[in-house]
Amino acid sequence: MTTTRIGLATCSALPRLDSDDRPLLAALTDRGVVTEAVVWDDPDVDWSVYDLVVVRSTWDYSPRRDDFLAWAQTVPRLENPADVLRWNTDKGYLRTLEEAGVPVIPTIWLDPDRHLSKRAVHTRMPAFGDFVVKPVVSAGAQDTGRYQPVSAQSRALAIKHAVDLLDGGRAVMIQPYVTSVDTTGETGLVFVDGELRHAVRKHALLTGPVEASEALYAAERMEPAVATPEQVDVAEKALAVAREQVGGEQPFLYARVDLVASDDGTPMVIELELTEPSLWMQHSGTAATLDAFADAIVARA
Ligand SMILES: Nc1ncnc2c1ncn2[C@@H]1O[C@H](COP(=O)(O)OP(=O)(O)O)[C@@H](O)[C@H]1O
Ligand SMILES: [Mg+2]
């Protein structure tokens, strides 16, 4: 009998995985499979030796999305698979969700190919209420800033932020700052093999303009949460649309749907994470999510 071998893909800055994912190594080893953390852009790795590679702590892909997707294509057995990663690493998927009737944060999209003038960028920014400027391809709240239209200085910084991203060839999103993020926070619903396993509440992250940062991701404050039936409904709809878009029958091995509340309390999708979501397993209260994830990985290997 040959031993099953599983690779957990990570980035070079976290060769032993993110602290959230690290317990998977022991959980999988306990299930009798050889498990290794492997750096996705390490040229010396032979990906064909793994029965299954699971994308986990690949936090550094966003400035190199093309390389990341090209790598994903070379891995014989990858979860979530390359087509899913392609669809999910560009937040343009929010438009698709919206068209399919899933509530999302209202968003203005700026395309670098349109070569918008500063003035044109300015006219697309909201006149009332704080707003957010962020790149369409990003992770870990990098390059994400919060601005106030009433302040000329803040508006100027927002324009500079958007123009810098566009000049770098990156598409930009402008959204109203959802104020409930400051009070009730963001709710992340964690799914393993299509089943809701637990939910977490994440506190607000953005206080002001974008800041230069060497960090891979912004430090986040989390706690366990209980999802409401309305939240579960929106999250499941979002996942069903995603499944339809990328084809395939099986539920996603892992998924996290992040929701915020609109002014009237409706849950809206802020992000659907099918690439490298932290599953916040240590915030699930029990080991149930970890066990379910390890079992699902072994079943697919
Ligand atoms: N429109 C918004 N309103 C309030 N907070 C936001 C908004 N957009 C982003 N944020 C904050 O920035 C963080 C990162 O944004 P997000 O869209 O989740 O991108 P990513 O996690 O991929 O960087 C969110 O967790 C939230 O705290
Ligand atoms: Mg997020």
Image (tube, grey):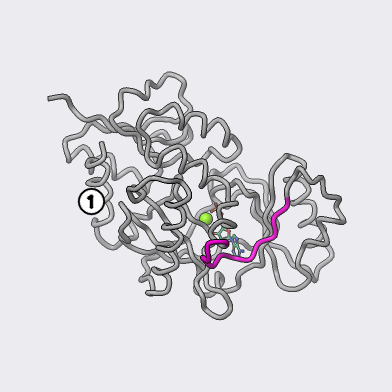
Q: Residues within 10 Å of mark 1 (few under 14, many from 20)?
A: some
Q: Secondary structure at mark 1?
A: helix
Residue 106 counted in the magenta span: yes
Q: Could you tell me which quadrant the N terminus lies in?
A: top left
Q: Quadrant of the C terminus?
A: top left
Front residue of this view, candidates 12 and 82: 82
Which amino acid is tagged 1? Asp
Q: How many marks?
A: 1
Q: Quadrant of residue 55?
A: top left
Q: In terms of depth relative to the viewer, which is nearer, 261 or 14?
A: 261
Name the residue that disc number 1 marks.
291
**Magenta span has 90?**
no
The residue furthest bottom is 264
- The main secondary structure of the magenta stretch is loop
Q: Residue 98: horizontal and vertical position, in percent?
A: 56, 62
- Does 175 sit above or below residue 242? below
Q: Which segment is the magenta one?
A: 99-110
Horizontal relation, residue 277 to residue 90: left or right: left
Left of 271 or right of it: where is 211? right
Residue 234, x across and y down, in percent: 45, 67
Q: Vertically, is 92 above or below 150?
A: above
Residue 274 placement (x, y as % from top left): 44, 49
Task: Indicate which quadrant contains ligand 1.
Answer: bottom right
| Residue located at (40% from left, 22% from top) | 45
